[in-house]
Image: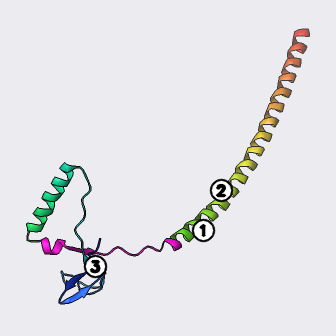
Amino acid sequence: MCAAAFVQNRKSYTGCTDAPNPAGESGRPWCYVEAQVCVCVFLDCLSAWILFLVELLSADAAEAAWNYCAPIVDYDGVRQEVSNIFADKAVQIQGLVAKLQKTQRAAEQALDKFVSFVNIIGLFAENSRIFFVQV
């Protein structure tokens, strides 16, 4: 989370800036990071504070105090895109269901023909046995 306001190279900023960051790089929005509030169990907070103090006392503390800004998310655009994708997928699934139903009907018809064929062969076989038995 960005600090509410910060000063960099004698210029004050609020929020993200495109000015060169403390490492001297530019072209990507950045800001100074606000200290995070710790809401947790006592031992977790104690270890978090110890890590915070170690980071604060380290030589790289100035570098660790800033970070790049996350891009702003257009939630209305995301909702619209997801809605369009769901509509397309619904149409696609309806087509697949229709194909599966058509395939199922064809398979049932083929099975019915097979059963009829087996029954005819069975009748022929029974009649043949009777014929052979009679001879």
Q: Quadrant of residue 135?
A: top right
Task: Look at mark 3 in the image and give the residue it sits on.
Answer: 30
Q: Is residue 53 left or right of residue 45?
A: left
What is the three-letter code of the residue carrying label 2?
Answer: Ile
Which segment is the magenta one? 60-77
Which element type, helix, strand or loop, lies under badge 1? Answer: helix
Q: Earlier in the sequence, mark 2 or mark 1?
A: 1
Residue at image coords 87%, 10%: 133
Q: Is residue 25 visible?
A: yes
4 to 36, vertically: above or below:
below
Task: Look at mark 1 in the image and give the residue it sits on.
Answer: 84
Which element type, helix, strand or loop, lies under badge 2? Answer: helix
| C-alpha distance separating marks 2 and 1 | 14 Å
Task: Look at mark 2 in the image and give the residue it sits on.
Answer: 93
Residue at image coords 54%, 68%: 79
Q: Is residue 86 left or right of residue 73?
A: right
| C-alpha distance separating marks 3 and 2 | 44 Å
| Depth order, front residue of 92/24 | 24
Q: Earlier in the sequence, mark 3 or mark 2?
A: 3
Q: Is residue 135 visible?
A: no
Q: Earlier in the sequence, mark 3 or mark 1?
A: 3
| Depth order, front residue of 134/66 | 66
Q: Tell which tag, 3 or 2, sits nearer the viewer.
A: 3
What is the three-letter code of the residue carrying label 1?
Answer: Asn
